[in-house]
Image (spheres, helix red, strand yellow):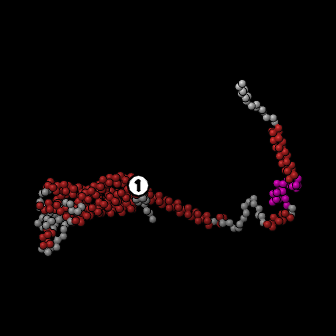
Amino acid sequence: MYFPRNHRYHKVLLYLMAVELPFTIVILTLTGIASHNLYRTKLWQDGADNGFNSSPDEQLYAAANYRPYKVPTVWSEFITDYNLVLGVLSTFFLITKVPIHFLRLFYPPLSVIVHGGLVAVYIASARYQAGPDMSDPAHPQPGAPWYITKKCTVAANKDNINYCRQSKALFAFTIIIIVLYFVEFVLSIHSCVLTPEERAERLEKAEEKRTWKEYEEAVLKSPAMIPMSPAYPQGMPAMTPRSLAFNRLGGDNSSDLPLREYLGGSNPRHSMQQESSAETLASGQYAQTGATAQSQPQMYFPPPPKKAAKT
């Protein structure tokens, strides 16, 4: 089974991750600022004042008249929390995959799963941010909200201009990060697919491995490689206690008596006497040398003269 472990565009992916870093930080910052409904309802009300979309008061009217009402996704709390979680998740994946990819452990199949999932969730985020608002038939909004399709200067409340720009920037960075993730996703898929050259190389290695395996099996099954009976190496005759005894009784002058050669053959006592006389002669010479060294006269050094006593 083929499992790709190396990226064909290892450095390119590192560069893309480096480019991805500032966009991820910006998305995390913008989603953090927008959390807890800082300006979502304000932009909703501003659009209603201009007649671009429904009004936040519609949910109050529906509750007062006991009518079911569903807040449009583009103005709901869900999209705010969703974007915040997505920003945190993207930051976590970035600080995790960079060192793993640098160590060449971020394998292409794993990269396909991660980047494919990120592309999917960010496409959903962009879809929610640009969702329609058809809750009010008198003021339908079939496309993206006004803060994306129109200039922020059209805001009825001038305090909402900065909030409009933040929402517009978040949508723009969402589109950019989708493009980056999609490029990384495509490069990872390309690294998972075998090229004709790689396929031929793998087939060649498999054929070579199969040939070597057949050769080893043939060698192991060959009769010439299996010894039929135990044998001694050449130059080492078989020796048993019985053969050693027969050699001694037969007068065989073998080398199984090493002391005989050491002590001088047939007359060991004579050899021992020669060795003892040699040791005695050597000790006598040493003693004579020591006596000669002691009998040599030593040089005499007279004491210094004493001072004469004063009269």
**In the image, farthest residue toward the top:** 311
In screen coordinates, is 210 left or right of 131?
A: right
Amino acid type, mark 1: Phe
Work out whether 142 lies above or below 267.
Answer: below
Quick check: can you spot residue 150? no
Instruction: Residue 71 in the image: state x and y as whole percent.
Output: 18, 68
In screen coordinates, is 237 left or right of 65?
A: right
Instruction: Residue 200 in the image: state x and y as whole percent.
Output: 46, 58
Q: Quadrant of residue 227?
A: bottom right
* Viewer-nearest residue: 36 or 113: 36
> Which residue matches tag 1?
102
Magenta residues span 252-270
**In the image, farthest residue toward the front:** 311
Work out whether 310 lies above or below 79.
Answer: above
In screen coordinates, is 203 left or right of 36?
A: right
Q: Residue at x 23, y 59 (%)?
A: 34
Q: Residue at x 76, y 31 (%)?
A: 302
Q: Quadrant of residue 39?
A: bottom left
Instruction: Residue 202 in the image: state x and y as whole percent.
Output: 47, 60
